[in-house]
Structure formats: C-alpha cells, structure tokens
C-alpha cells in the first residue's frame, strides 16, 4: 500500500485509480439507522415484508443518499492519501448518479479515481475524485459521483 504524503506525489496520480476499498455489507440495521437519521421511512427501505411482496427489487434497498454518504474501510489496494494539512474539507459534489439499487444483504466497495488537482491559493489546493460504488457480483455499479475536497496547509 502506497501512502501519498505530498502535493507533488498526489499530482503524479491525476487521471489514475487511487484506491479500492474493502467490502462493506449493507445491513437492514444500517438502512433503518439512516432512515431514522433522515426521516425517510419509505417502505422500500424499511418494511422488509412489504418490500419482499411488492417491491420490484424483491426486498428492501439502501437509500441512494446512504450509498453516497458511506465511509468505506481503508483501501485494500492502491494508495492512501495522508497529506500533512492543517485541515481537509469536503467542498461538495460535481455530479452524482445512482445507477443500480443496493439490496440489503449485498456488499459494496469503493473505487476512487483521482481526476484533478488545482492550486486555489498559496496554501490551498482543490482535488476532484471520482467514486464508483460497486455491488459485489453485479456488473452495474450502484453509484458514480465526483467529490471535491479542499486541502489547507497553513
């Protein structure tokens, strides 16, 4: 596992896949906790019996925004970014697409590709990464998104 500790090292990886996380199981308890936190108790997420009977997915599925918000285990492959910054900030998203439902009981993982790095000021850099959330055993990913991060050095 490579550890990226400088902006120059990070810049060298623009356009490359940075990392692949370990697998994370989507449990009904996780989906229920997310429903409680957001107030989104739509039956396709929380009513196991009704979803089994009536849902086109054959059971409950994770909320799209749960998939977006997941923090995956540390990378199993590739590189981990550990810059010596004062502060790292989630600056937002360029785009998000939910391509396939994540059924409860499935495992997902994250593939991160580093898209760009620009210097905003003397001590601030902005990076954009693509996050593809794969569903184990399925050809279509659950989600593809572009995340923007700001790195503050002083």
Image (spheres, rainbow, N blue to C red):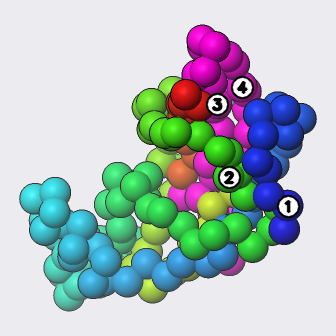
* Pointer 4 residue: 117
Question: Is 88 or 100 nearer to us in this picture?
Answer: 88
Q: Earlier in the sequence, mark 4 or mark 2?
A: 2
Q: Earlier in the sequence, mark 4 or mark 1?
A: 1
* Pointer 3 residue: 127
Percent x, y of residue 65 = 35, 52
Q: Nearer the viewer, mark 3 or mark 2?
A: 2
Decide: few, some or many residues near mark 1? Use Cα within 10 Å; few <14, some 14-19, many ≥20: few
Q: Residue at x 62, y 78 (%)?
A: 23
Q: Quadrant of residue 2?
A: bottom right
Q: Does the segment drawn in magenta span residue 58?
A: no
* Pointer 1 residue: 2
Q: Earlier in the sequence, mark 3 or mark 2?
A: 2
Give the Cα distance between marks 3 and 4. 4 Å
Q: Residue at x 66, y 75 (%)?
A: 22
Question: Which residues are drawn in magenta?
Answer: 113-142
Q: Secondary structure at mark 1?
A: strand
Q: Secondary structure at mark 4?
A: strand
**Does any portion of residue 30 appear in the rendered image?**
yes
> Are circles 3 and 1 on residues that touch, CB within 8 Å?
no
Give the Cα distance between marks 4 and 1. 19 Å
Question: Is 130 or 117 nearer to us in this picture?
Answer: 117
């Amino acid at each position: 596992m490579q550890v990226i500790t400088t902006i120059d090292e990070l810049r060298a990886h623009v356009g490359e896949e940075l990392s692949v996380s370990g697998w994370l199981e989507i449990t009904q308890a996780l989906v229920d906790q997310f429903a409680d936190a957001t107030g989104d108790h739509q039956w396709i997420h929380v009513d196991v019996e009704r979803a089994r009977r009536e849902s086109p997915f054959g059971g409950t599925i994770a909320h799209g925004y749960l998939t977006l918000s997941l923090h995956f285990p540390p990378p199993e492959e590739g590189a981990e970014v550990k810059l010596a910054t004062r502060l790292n900030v989630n600056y937002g998203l360029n785009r998000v697409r939910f391509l396939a439902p994540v059924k409860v009981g499935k495992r997902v993982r994250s593939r991160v590709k580093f898209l760009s790095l620009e210097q905003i000021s003397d001590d601030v850099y902005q990076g954009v990464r693509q996050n593809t959330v794969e569903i184990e055993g399925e050809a279509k990913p659950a989600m593809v998104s572009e995340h923007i991060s700001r790195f503050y050095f002083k």
